[in-house]
Amino acid sequence: MTATEQRLRKLRGVMEQEGIEALLITNAVNRKYLTGFTGTAGYVVVTADRAWLFVDFRYVTQAGEQAHGYEVVEHGVPAARTIGETLRALGISKLGFEQQDVTYGSYLQYAADLGDGLKLVPTDGVVEKLRRVKDEEELKVIQQAVDIADAAFEHALTRLRTGVPEQEIAFELEFFMRKSGASGKSFETIVASGVRSAMPHGVASDKLIGTDEFVTMDFGAVNKGYCSDLTRTVFIGQPTPKHKELYDIVLEAQLTALEGLRSGITGREGDALARDVIAKYGYGDYFGHGTGHCVGLDIHESPRLSKTEGTVLESGMVITVEPGIYIPGFGGVRIEDMVVITDRGCSIMTKSRKDFILL
């Protein structure tokens, strides 16, 4: 059984449990996950015994080659009219839709275009919940994305020096990842130096990297649609005792979380593993984001490691572990690895060094 067929079977199991007669998938990432189709437009409809991929004339051939196990149908305009006609012919009266993906305006248009006799019913995260646990093929592809980011970090170390703009380092990271096989970057590359390192999402600017300051780099590669996420903080020049203290605390927090993460604990408990260490040293108010988030086809997936996350972690989830301390006017430190949750703990995917690197 192919990965696509396994995902379709799991989806039908959830649909049966939740009483969903037919499900319309409009989210592009969910469409790719379920079908393997990489085109930019299309609609997936799944019932208990049928599965369709509705596409326009541009993608009929491609869909037929990629979406194994799906009936490929060239839809008319509007697409929902073709979908409605197909489902009514089978006696289906209720169609679930992805409430997080469909705007109210789109809902009204779908309702009108589907025609009479077919009621739209909202669903919440049906496919996203399936995507939480990665299969073996997904883990292999994600590991390749992680490896590309690891190599890019080593490359960046050879380019980091005083007087170089942050944007140049970001370009070096992104260009290296593309040359290494990545199809793109996971998100806008962060290179934040000096006082800017106190900005958790300080995307690369035209600031010149100075002397005696932190440089935080947060970046990732996309490989076959799957993302990686890596953060390292290094130091240019001679650190003060406070610089070293902050780094050591964040590293201790991160290592503590890595040691304690496992299946069966909640995201809230996972977050506390790192947060409690930072709070113990008096810097709790300077750690304002969650400890991590799941990663896959999207860079931010659920569940997360946060103070409010009650979801239980499961074996096969891929998640980041990225505590930080950020002091305005001084600087900040973040250290981030990607791991796979297991029954016995977690397996660390990231291999980049984490000692306090001085350049």
Image (tube, rainbow, N blue to C red):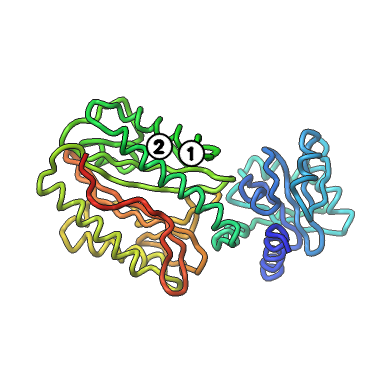
Quadrant of the snapshot with the C terminus:
top left
Q: Residue at x 23, y 46 (%)?
A: 357
**Amino acid carrying mark 2 in the image:** Thr
Left or right: 222 as drawn, with respect to 42 = left
Q: Residues within 10 Å of mark 1 (few under 14, many from 20)?
A: many
Q: Quadrant of residue 260?
A: bottom left
Relative image position of residue 139 (x, y in whole percent) = 54, 58
Position of residue 209 measured from the top left corner of the image (x, y, whole percent): 24, 30
Q: Of the numbered discs in the image, which one, if any, rests on residue 300?
A: none
Q: Is residue 200 left or right of residue 65?
A: left
Residue highlighted by disc 1: 185
Mark 2 secondary-structure assignment: loop
Q: Secondary structure at mark 1?
A: strand
Q: Residues within 10 Å of mark 2 (few under 14, many from 20)?
A: many
The amino acid at mark 1 is: Lys
Percent position of residue 317, x then y: 50, 62
**Which corner quadrant holds the N terminus?**
bottom right
Spatial CA distance of label 1 from label 2 is 8 Å
The label shown at residue 189 is 2
User: In the visual, does 143 lie left or right of 136?
Assistant: left
